[in-house]
């Protein structure tokens, strides 16, 4: 961690990357639903 402190990136140690990863996956799942419906409508598909 000495290197991070030297570069002034000490804030990286306070970020919880597990929460960031979980929110990223949640956002992808939430966005994928309407995206699939939009693609089906655009291609005149049927479920």
Image (spheres, helix red, strand yellow):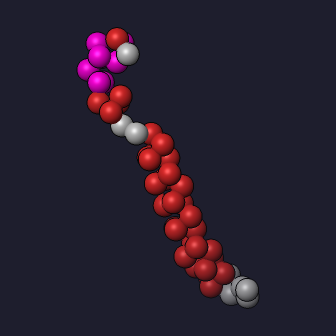
Q: Would you say residue 18 sits in the magenta stretch?
A: no
Please report the residue visible at 49 percent of the width from the left and 61 percent of the height from the top: 27
Q: Is residue 21 left or right of residue 39?
A: left
Please report the residue visible at 54 percent of the width from the left and 55 percent of the height from the top: 25
**Looking at the rendering, which quadrant does residue 45 occupy?**
bottom right
Please report the residue visible at 36 percent of the width from the left and 37 percent of the height from the top: 15
Q: In this view of the protein, which residue sits in the foreground, 17 or 33?
A: 17
Q: In this view of the protein, which residue sits in the foreground, 42 or 13?
A: 13
**Looking at the rendering, which quadrant does residue 33 occupy?**
bottom right
Farthest residue, direction left: 8
Q: Position of residue 40 (x, y in %)?
A: 66, 81
In the rendered view, would you say 14 is above or below 38?
A: above
Q: Is residue 4 left or right of residue 35?
A: left
Q: Which residues are magenta?
A: 3-10
The quadrant in which the C terminus is found is bottom right
**Looking at the rendering, which quadrant does residue 2 occupy?**
top left
Q: In this view of the protein, which residue sits in the foreground, 15 or 27?
A: 15
């Amino acid at each position: 961690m000495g290197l991070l402190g030297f570069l002034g990136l000490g804030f990286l140690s306070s970020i919880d990357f597990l929460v960031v990863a979980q929110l990223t996956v949640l956002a992808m799942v939430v966005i994928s639903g309407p995206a699939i419906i939009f693609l089906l409508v655009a291609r005149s598909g049927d479920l």
